[in-house]
Amino acid sequence: MATQLSRTFGSQGNQRKFTISTWVKRNKLGTTQSFFGSGGATNYSTAMYFRGSDDTIVFYNYFNGAYAGQKYSSASYRDTSAWYHIVFRVDTTSATASERMRIYVNGEEISYATSNNPNQNQTMEVGHTGTHYIGGYGTGAQAEMCMSHYHYCDGQSYAPTEFGEYDANGVWKIKLEPSVSYGVSGHFLFNNDASVTDQSGLGNNWSTSGTLTQTEDNPSNVFCTMNPLDNYWQNSTFTNGNNTFVTVASNENYNTSTLAMPSNDAGKYYCEVKVDSASAYTVLGIAGKLTTSATSNFKNHSDGYALTSDSGNIINNNISSSYGVSYTTNDIIGIAVDTDNNKLYFSKNGTWMNSGVPTSGATGTGAISITTDTTNGYYMFAGGTRHNDSAQLSWNFGNGYFGTTAVASAGTNASGIGIFEYDVPTGYTALSTKGLNL
């Protein structure tokens, strides 16, 4: 979410007791990214954010020109492949100092590098009749992250168990309908949509600067993106929820996806990538090595399969073989990976190359045969360039967008997971946590 929300409340809320609960998926690291910010007057403010210098969580209250409560996490939060459930819990009326200002991540209170508790009955700069912000703080710290189920509970200090719970496997999961109270200035946003209409029943709606984009990615089904942390060789720049990246014209290497497909297990996966701007030697496909564990482009490895833009050839283990057709700017390449039968297929603008039939199973009509003997036991989607060129690639792993542009006409999807431009072959699914567990 790169768009900032704002609201000025008409009625005073509780400035000593409140809870903010939200699920977030980070898109950008190394810059300050704000959950919430508010300032009632000069030298008065409260804010919560990821700090740009080290990706830690900061929660502070600044009152009358001095800090009146500070919490800085010990841990850094750099996982761009998962959703974090973060709860900011305040009750300055408590006689117990450690209960006045707390942060929880995925159900557990965090450890603090800095922990300065506010005085008892300290006023926070929240719930007043000034302007409040979500996903930013005025002109600064605007967030590039996804948010889901944003609750502000005015006058209540709730434990994270009101909003989440452990499943049978010990995984922290979302409670879709928590039984909570919202007080006067409370609100509930992003309940499975991108609306800024308050769904708490209080009518505390918000204003938007910019455009919110709804995503299929959510705390109950985490979708694959490209991985900005696996960026050792390429030094690419990432935008649009890490689904668009621009390569740097100084290396020939590649970037990989956040989620991986087991190479020796049952599963069939599909994605699409739009070539926003092509180099003469763009490569798309699957890789068994992270860039940090490779010494050259994935096309040069035994578990790397790269479709080249200039000829449509497949390069595997640095050996080029005739396969499909060339592609260039504005073409959409579909990639279908069948790990049931160890087959790989490519399409261009909806037509399968080499007369491929992704549903042909072990026969593998028009397929590339792939190995199960990968470096790490899995494949990732991969893309880049094979010479010192620059290219821009926008991936659709099922969110229904190429960059900021929605697919023109969604194709059929038998698995019911994800939105794609073209028909998804029967039996194939998006690479997401639900898709991996089909």
Image (cartoon, rainbow, N blue to C red):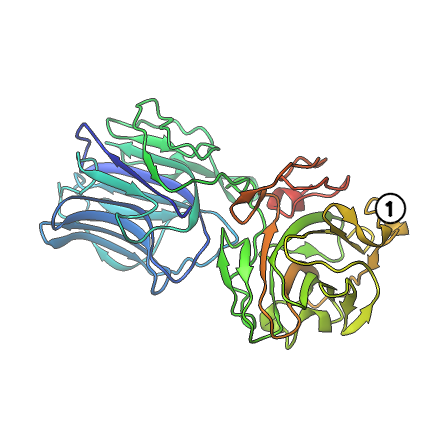
Relative depth, front residue between 162 and 348: 348
Q: Position of residue 346 (x, y in %)?
A: 76, 54
Mark 1 secondary-structure assignment: loop
Query: Is the residue marked by circle 1 packed among few (<14), some (14-19), or many (20+) residues within 10 Å?
Result: few
Relative depth, front residue between 141 and 36: 141
Above or below: residue 95 compared with residue 246: above
Write the residue at 54% across / 39% down. 220
Above or below: residue 136 compared with residue 20: below
Q: Quadrant where the C terminus lies?
A: top right
Left or right relative to 117: residue 161: right
Q: Position of residue 403 (x, y in %)?
A: 54, 49
The image quarter in which residue 387 lies: bottom right
Mark 1 = which residue?
A: 360
Residue 337 shows in this picture: no
Q: Residue furthest left?
A: 64
Residue 30 shows in this picture: yes
The kind of residue tagged 1 is: Ser
Q: Position of residue 311 (x, y in %)?
A: 77, 65
Q: Residue furthest right?
A: 363
Write the residue at 73% across / 43% down. 428
Relative depth, front residue between 399 and 281: 281
